[in-house]
Amino acid sequence: MSRSAHPAGPRHADVLPEGHYAAPPVDLNALDPKVWAQTVTRDEDGVVTVGGVDVKTLAEEVGTPAYVLDEEDFRARARAWRTAFGHDADVFYAGKAFLSRAVVRWLDEEGLNLDVCSGGELGTALSAGLAPDRIAFHGNNKTPAEIRRAVEAGVGRIVLDSFQEIVRVAHLARELGKRQRVQIRVTVGVEAHTHEFIATAHEDQKFGIPLAGGQAAEAVRRALQLDSLDVIGIHSHIGSQIFDMSGFEVAAHRVVGLLKDIRDEHGVELPEIDLGGGLGIAYTSEDDPREPHEIAKALTEIVTRECEAARLRTPRISVEPGRAIAGPTAFTLYEVGTVKPLEGLRTYVSVDGGMSDNIRTALYDAEYSVALVSRTSDAEPMLVRVVGKHCESGDIVVKDAFLPADLAPGDLIAVPATGAYCRSMASNYNHALRPPVVAVREGEARVIVRRETEEDLLRLDVG
Ligand code: LLP
């Protein structure tokens, strides 16, 4: 579709319909390094390459849609977190962002630990050979079977989320003749500035035990009395996709306050605190995330200062970044199907995936960017909404973005920053087959999670 074929098309800022979008980018062919994986570039023909592999070859070899993951970038980000926190702190990658056996091995090689929150994640970690003592086990409703498996395997810590769970874990550990290392997850009463569904430290939600009213102190009191539990510290996770460090500051202040109360009451200084994950990434050029070393410096300073004020030994800090490691390292590669201009509104670009491979736009109103990746174009920018092929009008991948006006069926487009919470939250809605994850590195593409097949779907259908 050329500009002249659609003269009244909504292309210019002065005729844009209502919505949230920046002005069209000056150069639609540019790939902002803020949102694209580190090795992404265009080759001399204008085709986007990542890890030395071009997207046309990838589309031919593995099909679309596909999550394309830059292994070098993943490792570099993991390493940056590890290095930033040094030897006096531990980094637990939050596996919920994206987990596979290859990822576990990369983390292992880069010296990170792993946070899991289900039997499935635990099983994946163990089957990839990660030492159990490098695993933290989370969840607000771990089943007795999950707890048993975790204790038997010898996980490094279980993060206790309720009074009932304190008793459950203590019982099972005693039955197994073990003393289980545990942390107690508290809610510090911080309203994180993020989407309501991914904020976790205010009091009216399901995670953790409130500091308010002395409940967390009571939980510690009970746990300390149980011989089969080794209480190593306090855990706080305030939410996700957070840019502002002030929430962490308040959380650290309150957690250290609890450590002080515990010292005063029980004469014990708990040796660890975990400040959770939640650090934001750039989904569009407008987002400005902080670097791991800045975050490490800020968190360490806050905890040290608070502890000095409370005359406590500074505990060992741990953090649990998920999105900040995995998110920027992958993009989703789609083939354009239908291009439908709606006069005076925008052009709907339908791709061969949708809310089954990226539910975040529908669920959280998430913002994404998008680019034409199989070629460059000098055509004018056109305002688009990238939508999927599902039976829902809310099946939106990118709400508002600009693509070249000559976009046509068969073009490949890619949505960056989909490495976290896209494959891990993918569904089979409309019996969609979940896309593969392809890791690229030094000119080689390797499928680390294969595409689902119709046989996979039918295997579960035993009726
Ligand atoms: N630690 C705990 C205890 C968590 O609950 C989470 C995330 C993390 C660490 C990692 O947070 P991250 O650094 O990845 O933000 N599905 C949502 C995010 C839910 C996060 C749940 N917990 C999304 O797509 O934005």
Image (spheres, grey):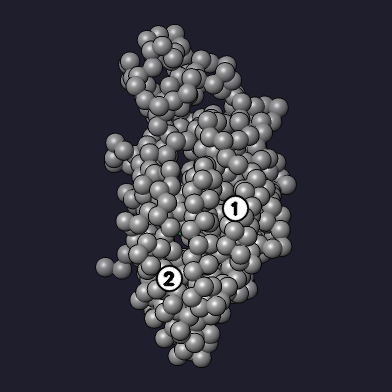
Q: Is mark 2 on a helix, strand or loop?
A: helix
Numbered label tally: 2
Counting other residues with Cα less than 10 Å from the Cα at mark 2, is it few (<14), some (14-19), or many (20 or more)?
Answer: many
- Residue 53 seen in the current view: no
Mark 1 C-beta to ligand 1 under 8 Å: no
On the image, the x and y values in percent for residue 214 come to: 38, 67
Tell me if residue 183 comes above or below residue 205 in the rendering. below
Which mark, by number, is residue 410?
Answer: none
Q: Distance between the residues labelled 1 and 2?
A: 22 Å
Q: On the picture, is 67 further left or further right than 42? A: left
Query: Which residue is under mark 1?
Result: 302
Q: Nearer the viewer, residue 458 or 107?
A: 107
Coordinates of residue 310 in the picture (x, y in percent)? 57, 62
Residue 91 position within the rendered picture, expressed as x and y whole percent measured from the top left: 62, 60
Q: How crowded is mark 1: few (under 14 residues within 10 Å), some or many (20 or more)?
A: some
Query: Mark 1 near mark 2, Cβ–Cβ under 8 Å?
Result: no
Most foreground residue, 168 or 233 = 233
The residue at the point 47 percent across, 23 percent down is 22
Is label 1 in a helix, a strand or a loop?
helix
Query: Label 2: which residue?
Result: 217
